[in-house]
Image (cartoon, rainbow, N blue to C red):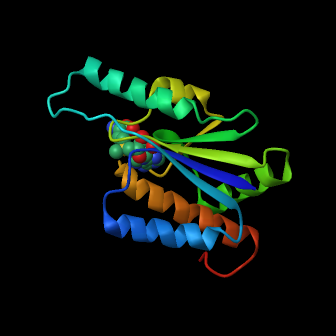
Amino acid sequence: MKITILCVGKIKEKYFNMGIDEYSKRLSRYCKLEIIEVSDEKTPDNASMAEELQIKKKEGERLLKYIKDGAYVITLAIEGKEVTSVELSEKIEKLGISSESHIIFIIGGSLGLDEAVLKSGDYSLSFSKMTFPHQMMRMILLEQIYRAYRIIHNQPYHK
Ligand SMILES: C[S@@+](CC[C@H](N)C(=O)[O-])C[C@H]1O[C@@H](n2cnc3c(N)ncnc32)[C@H](O)[C@@H]1O
């Protein structure tokens, strides 16, 4: 199975990069992992609602270019569906068995995902009602995908 993490902006913090590299390395035995970063827009502190929508639209247009036909698209959004780690593993396993052998997870930038990106998804996943920074979200998502594969393969890790 191929897994693409499509996200906005670069990881600036060294400690997030270390976590991301570690889980990417661990995942390499279970799937073909690809991380695609599109550039983010600068958000002025006093940006108006209209400016913020414009920023999300521009970032969204960049993300949409990487959505491939035939891939199953999961957007990450606070208002998405909350699932357990086991349920996520079942979803990934089911998609792997069916013809959907490519999953694209999309993480938004600091203002979130544009409506057009949210609409393009097959499923919207929430990690709780709390807001996480997008850099941290990338690391958490990779850990949860790794956890899912350990569950799928009946290997110790998930308690
Ligand atoms: C800083 S958050 C954006 C916050 C923005 N106000 C919003 O509501 O989307 C950056 C990105 O991280 C992801 N994210 C943050 N918290 C999340 C959560 N609890 N569940 C799922 N995704 C989350 C989303 O993809 C979001 O677009």
Give the left or right position of residue 39, taking residue 119 as reference.
Answer: left
Residue 23 higher or lower than 141, as above or below = below
- The residue depicted at 38 percent of the width and 41 percent of the height is 109
Image check: 147 left or right of 62?
Answer: right
Q: In which quarter of the image is ligand 1?
A: top left
Q: Considering depth in this image, is 86 or 75 the residue closer to the camera?
A: 75
Foreground of the two, 50 or 9: 9
Which of the 4 image quadrants contains residue 123?
top right
Identify the residue at image location x=32%, y=34%: 41
| In this picture, residue 34 sits left or right of residue 42 | right
The residue furthest bottom is: 156
Residue shown at 85%/53% (left/top)? Answer: 97
Q: Where is residue 80? Give x, y as percent.
A: 52, 40
Count of numbered marks: 0
Q: Identify the image quadrant of the N terminus.
A: bottom right
Q: In this view, does 98 lie above or below 30?
A: above
Q: Position of residue 159 (x, y in %)?
A: 59, 77
Q: In this view, does 112 lie above or below 119?
A: below
* In-front residue for pair 104/131: 104
Name above or below for residue 69 compared with residue 105.
above
Return the x and y of residue 79 as percentages of the image width and height: 46, 38
Outermost residue, left side: 46
Which residue is pictured at 54% across the width and 61% down the height? 142
The reply to whether residue 145 is in sight is yes
Residue closest to the eye, 20 or 146: 20
Q: Can residue 129 be seen in this view?
A: no
As drawn, the residue found furthest toward the right would be 98
